[in-house]
Each structure stands twice: as structure tokens, then as C-alpha cells.
Image (tube, rainbow, N blue to C red):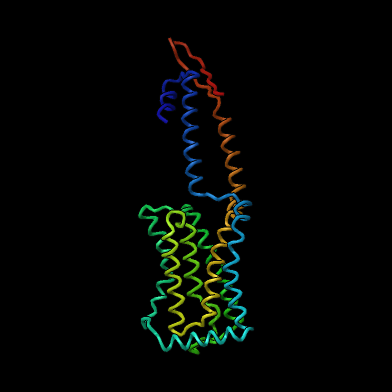
């Protein structure tokens, strides 16, 4: 910017001086492009999907277990057995601390980021992924709770299947594992420890059956993994056209600024100074 002011004041720029200005503009453009890339990043879509699709099998199996408990009597007997054991050997606090434990993993992710521990994605990307996972999970849970109408162990209502607290906790645990698992495996352990504790507390507080908790864990993990798989496609579809339009505008601006015609005054004579960059 300083070089441009000098050129305008002198009203007689040379080809080399203008080329230097153009070079500085290009450098600034590269910095802006880098910042945009850091704010909005998405991994390769096709290979990303193919390599991660098999990871959906374990959480899908957990969901399948919960659904099967409606039809397989031994599973329901196991639910009742675990419920009785939890009543006889109740060791948890009366206060529902799982109301807070379910949010611990995502809070830790953002807290650690503020402390300087950076994860796999940028703030914008991981936030959009988390919101997407929460949306898919919430829709699934609402539909199932109101369609299955399973009675809770304490008989309070018929919204027992699946466990919403457990689903939310495991969605956050998988979110923490995805973002910080590459930094250290201990972050994944911490996230899943909070999620498991949440599920156990839901059983001991007589809010859910064992199969409710298992299915909730599956739904939570499945939602987050699905969000990480689908996000690159949505991200590229939304911003691809915008990126192309931005590049076209920048190219047009560069073409417009490649020539410069200025009036000049030297030794009592008026004239024009023409400069161009290639």
C-alpha cells in the first residue's frame, strides 16, 4: 500500500515500480486465500467416505441390539435382571450428575482448543459437524421415543427407548475422539469415560433399561461418525460455486489493474505515463 501511494504522488511510475506493487498485491491475495482455507477446510470426499464407512458397523450393531430387545425375550429378561441388580447394589449419587457429564466431552474439546490444544478441524468446521450430528441424533431419538413408547423402569413415562442422555454423551465422546484422538489417545479415553458413566448412572437412577442405554450409545456414535462422513460433501457443495465466483472476480480485478495510465509533469511539459505488468 505504501508503494502505491508513492507512485500516485510521483505521477511517473516506471514499469519495475509498478511490477513491485503488483507483486505485493499478489502476496496479500495469497495471505487472504490461506486464511480462508484455514477457516473452511474439508478432507477429500470420495476416499474419506470409502475409508471410514466400515466404522459405522459397530455403532449400528449397538442400535440393532436395542431394537432386537423388543422382539427377543432373553434380552428383556437381561434388562430386568440388570435393573434388579442396580436396585440392590446402588452406589451412585442421588443427584443426577449425568445431566452434566453428557456435555463434558464437547466442552473439553473447545476448552482445550482455547488452551492451545488444536484438533483435526478448525473452529468453524468442527462446530458445523457437531451441529449436524446433534441434528441427526435429535431427530432420530424424537421419532423413536414417540413411536416405540417403552415404559421407563420407574414408570414415569413411555419415552424410555433410546436413552437421550447416553446418546448425547456418546455423540460428544466420539466428537472428542475425532478431533483430539490424533493428538493423544487419552483424550478419546476421557471422552468415552464420561459417556460410559452417563449411561451407567441412567440405569442406576432407574431412568432407562440396559438396552435403552446400549441403543443410545449406538445412536450417538453413529450420528457423529455420519456427520464426519457427510460434512465434506455438504461443505464442498455449498462453497464450491462461491469459490469459483470469487476466483473469477479476482481474476477480473487483476486484469483491470494490469495497466495504469497517469498524467505526468516534467521540466515544464505535460504528458502521460503508461505502465503495464505481465
| x and y, in percent, of residue 266 in the image | 44, 12
Who is closer to the viewer here, 180 or 224? 180
Instruction: Give above or below for 245 relative to 94.
Output: above
Who is closer to the viewer here, 93 or 246? 93
Q: Residue drawn at (60%, 69%), measured in percent from left and top?
A: 60
* 243 to the left or right of 171: right
Who is closer to the viewer here, 120 or 193? 193
Question: Which residue of the protein is positioned furthest toward the top in this rendering?
Answer: 267
Q: Residue drawn at (37%, 55%), measured in percent from left and top?
A: 114
Q: Residue drawn at (63%, 52%), measured in percent from left and top?
A: 46
| x and y, in percent, of residue 206 in the image | 46, 85
Instruction: Give above or below for 68 relative to 56.
Output: below
Number of numbered discs present? Answer: 0
| x and y, in percent, of residue 89 in the image | 40, 86
Who is closer to the viewer here, 253 or 167? 167
| x and y, in percent, of residue 242 in the image | 59, 47
Instruction: Give above or below for 136 relative to 156.
Output: above
Quadrant of the image containing the C terminus: top right
Quadrant of the image containing the N terminus: top left
Amino acid at each position: 500500500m505504501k508503494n502505491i501511494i508513492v507512485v500516485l504522488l510521483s505521477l511517473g511510475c516506471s514499469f519495475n515500480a509498478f511490477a513491485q506493487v503488483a507483486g505485493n498485491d499478489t502476496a496479500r491475495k495469497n495471505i487472504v486465500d490461506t486464511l480462508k482455507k484455514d477457516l473452511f477446510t474439508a478432507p477429500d470426499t470420495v476416499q474419506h467416505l470409502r475409508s471410514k464407512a466400515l466404522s459405522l458397523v459397530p455403532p449400528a450393531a449397538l442400535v440393532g441390539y436395542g431394537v432386537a430387545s423388543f422382539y427377543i425375550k432373553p434380552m428383556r429378561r437381561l434388562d430386568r435382571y440388570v435393573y434388579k441388580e442396580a436396585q440392590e447394589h446402588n452406589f451412585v449419587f442421588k443427584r443426577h450428575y449425568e445431566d452434566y457429564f453428557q456435555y463434558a466431552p464437547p466442552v473439553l474439546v473447545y476448552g482445550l482448543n482455547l488452551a492451545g490444544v488444536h484438533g483435526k478441524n478448525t473452529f468453524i468446521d468442527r462446530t458445523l459437524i457437531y451441529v449436524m450430528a446433534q441434528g441427526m441424533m435429535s431427530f432420530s431419538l424424537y421419532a423413536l421415543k414417540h413411536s416405540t413408547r417403552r415404559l421407563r423402569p420407574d414408570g414415569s413415562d413411555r419415552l424410555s427407548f433410546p436413552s437421550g442422555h447416553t446418546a448425547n454423551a456418546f455423540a460428544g465422546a466420539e466428537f472428542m475422539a475425532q478431533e483430539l484422538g490424533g493428538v493423544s489417545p487419552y483424550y478419546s479415553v476421557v471422552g468415552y469415560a464420561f459417556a460410559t458413566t452417563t449411561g451407567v448412572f441412567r440405569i442406576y437412577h432407574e431412568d432407562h433399561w440396559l438396552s435403552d442405554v446400549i441403543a443410545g450409545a449406538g445412536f450417538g456414535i453413529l450420528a457423529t461418525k455420519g456427520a464426519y462422513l457427510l460434512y465434506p460433501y455438504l461443505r464442498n457443495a455449498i462453497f464450491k460455486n462461491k469459490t469459483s465466483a470469487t476466483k473469477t472476480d479476482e481474476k477480473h480485478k487483476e486484469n483491470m489493474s494490469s495497466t495504469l495510465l497517469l498524467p505526468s509533469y516534467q521540466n515544464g511539459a505535460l504528458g502521460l505515463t503508461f505502465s503495464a505488468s505481465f
